[in-house]
Amino acid sequence: MKNWFTNNRGELPSFVHNRRLRRIMMFISLIVIYGIVISFLYNIVASLILIVISVVGLIFTIVMMNEISSDTNRYITDLSYRIHRGEQESLLEMPIGVMILNDDEQVEWANPYMVKYFKDENLLGRKIDDIDHDLQQLITKYAESDEFHTITWRDHKFTMLIQKEYNSVYLMDITRYANLEERYNEEQISVGQIFLDNYDEITQSMTDQEISNLSNYVTNELATWSQKYGMYLKQIDDDHFFLLAYSKSLTAIENDKFNILDTVRETTSKQNFPLTLSIGIAYGEDDLNNLADQAQSNLDLALGRGGDQVVVKSLDGTARFYGGKTNPMEKRTRVRARMISQALNELMSASDQVFVQGHTRPDMDSLGACLGIRRIAQMNNKKCWIVLDKEKVHSDIQRLLEATKKYPEIADSIITPSEAIAKATDSSMLIMVDHSKPSISISEDLYKRMSAKVVIIDHHRRGEEFPENPMLVYIEPYASSTCELITEMFEYQPHEEEPINRIEATAMLTGIFIDTQRFSMRTGTRTFDAASYLRSAGADSDEMQQFMKENIDSYLQRNHLISKVEFFHKNMALIVGEEDQVYDPVTAAQACDSLLTMSGVDASFIITKRSDGQIGVSARSTGAVNVQVIMEQMGGGGHLSSGATQVSDKSVADVKKMLLETIKNIDDNE
């Protein structure tokens, strides 16, 4: 009996050491003993038979449980051995490079997969820096990080992990997958729209042969360009092309800065037919319908900025601009002015009232345009409210507001932003003049309230920030001012109402006068036509001079700022205000304008602190330098020859450094 409960070495059977089996055995034993005791109370013979059966069953149970326990132990031992051996073999055979270093960065061990990248040279005991300096630098770079990093080493791409506590380096070769990913990214589809900006205007005065020669030249030039970069080009109309390209082709032409723009413009200019291109390209989307819509939107943005440029933008990315270095050519016609005017009349007729607002810190062009829109609304028998924050206006606007008190119907139409929000209804219409960025509106909250019914009239180049679904857009970057655009609309309005009055004509002519620098910049024949109309409508030149007069403080501030001028880049001038001195933005802009009158200055910039704590930057140009691109790089916008931006959370000195670096980067990329 003793042998049944011991093994050959005199030890207890293995199942006794298993707590669960031991409990089962104890439970069975108690049941058997209880049964025997009960049987003795009723029948001795039956109890004896039960004892024999119980002893035999107990012996069988002990033997079976011992075998089960032994089998389990053998399985666990074998499994442990196989796991341990698998770990060792995996370190040697798995396709992951493993290297263990000591504290002196000497190689203590490396698996065969790692060794093959060193061409089987001896690694053990040598410093990693002596073996491969590039790898040592990568290990040092990521030694403190417990994240996976993608690296390039020995013409391969790896995922690297460093376990500093164990001095272990793991490298997984992902070259194949990286190449597949790179190929996938390179073969993403980009959709483009190409438009010949002024094709209709140029070909109007050309013979059929000249038109054919011009079309052939442009088509051949674009075809050669597309073939060079492996793109698909299809002509849709005389002035419209469709483009398909891989992302790698898009990267190549972006690196080339879309030189096709300069090629076409310069060649056609030499032939006295200056033709320019506008291109919109979209990428980063699997749905071709969405890509096509985005490409058209990008083309609209390029045209809204004056043409002769490229806009590259994904559906949810930031737009990249190329070109746009030249003044846009005047190509608007009386027909377009009439169509816009009639469309505006119809929209006003469908609205219960009209609200008009300019940009923050309004100038004479902004408020003059508001007065012009109010008159157009009146001609269409609609009530128009001019939204204005009277607490944030310059001295010239204050003088204009004082003059409007003689005209109660005008003075009563000027309301605050809060009053406008209270008056607005779902049937009301909002007209944004002299700007197209909601963030710089006098009341952005009013725009949000009426975003479903918005009209934009502006002469600045369109920026990336733009209302989503405006009902009507009239952006003409080649116009001198917004007042010029609105003046042209009066001819196509109902004449039952009285024509524009003296104060409205004076304000609008002042806006044109100031925006053109006394008719010295950005003026065309249409500018003088508009000025002539306003003069004939009663614009008072003496009152204009009164509006434009500076107060003593502004005059002294402007001269003080001009005295701080410094020159750089041979043809640029810069004024930097004091860190602790607040300057009026209008005064700063006037000082910036004054610098352009200096000999040899093609572009001027001024950096000053504003009353709201932001740092304001104004930029002006004679047209030789595209200051709009510079201001856009700094988060602002404007026109080719006029731009501005505001920078938060930086000092005047920081913004100066930022401006100079932006100009340098633009010069380096050209």
Image (cartoon, rainbow, N blue to C red):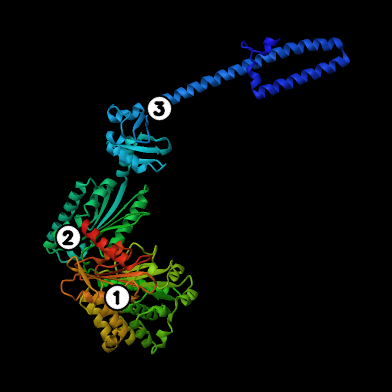
Residues 490 and 27: in front is 27
The amino acid pointed to by label 2 is Arg
Q: Is residue 622 above or below residue 117?
A: below
Of the numbered discs 3 and 2, the one sitting upstream in the chain is: 3
Measuring from the top left, give residue 284's x and y in whole percent: 35, 49
Between marks 2 and 1, how big is the CA–CA gap? 36 Å
SS type, badge 3: helix
**Discs 2, 1 touching: Cβ within 8 Å:** no
Considering only vertical position in the picture, is 428 above or below 542? Answer: above
Q: Nearer the viewer, residue 42 or 308?
A: 42
- 418 displayed left or right of 322: right
- Amino acid, disc 3: Leu
Dividing the picture into quadrants, the one containing residue 59 is top right
Q: Is residue 606 visible?
A: yes
Indicate whether 375 appears above or below 131. below
> Where is the N terminus found, in terms of image quarters?
top right
Q: Which residue is mark 1?
A: 588
Which residue is label 3 attached to? 91
- Residue 501 position within the rendered picture, expressed as x and y whole percent measured from the top left: 33, 86
Judge left or right: residue 257 versus residue 381.
left
Report if residue 537 is visible in the image.
no
- Residue at which label 2 appears: 265
The label on residue 456 is none
- Discs 3/1, front: 3
Local SS, label 1: helix
Distance CA(mark 3)–CA(mark 1): 70 Å
The local crowd at label 1, few if under 14, some if 14 to 19, many if 20 or more residues have their Cα within 10 Å, is many
User: Percent from the top left, x then y, of residue 374?
Assistant: 38, 79
Q: Is residue 281 left or right of residue 166?
A: left
Q: Residue at x 72, y 21 (%)?
A: 26
Residue 463 location in percent, x, y? 32, 64
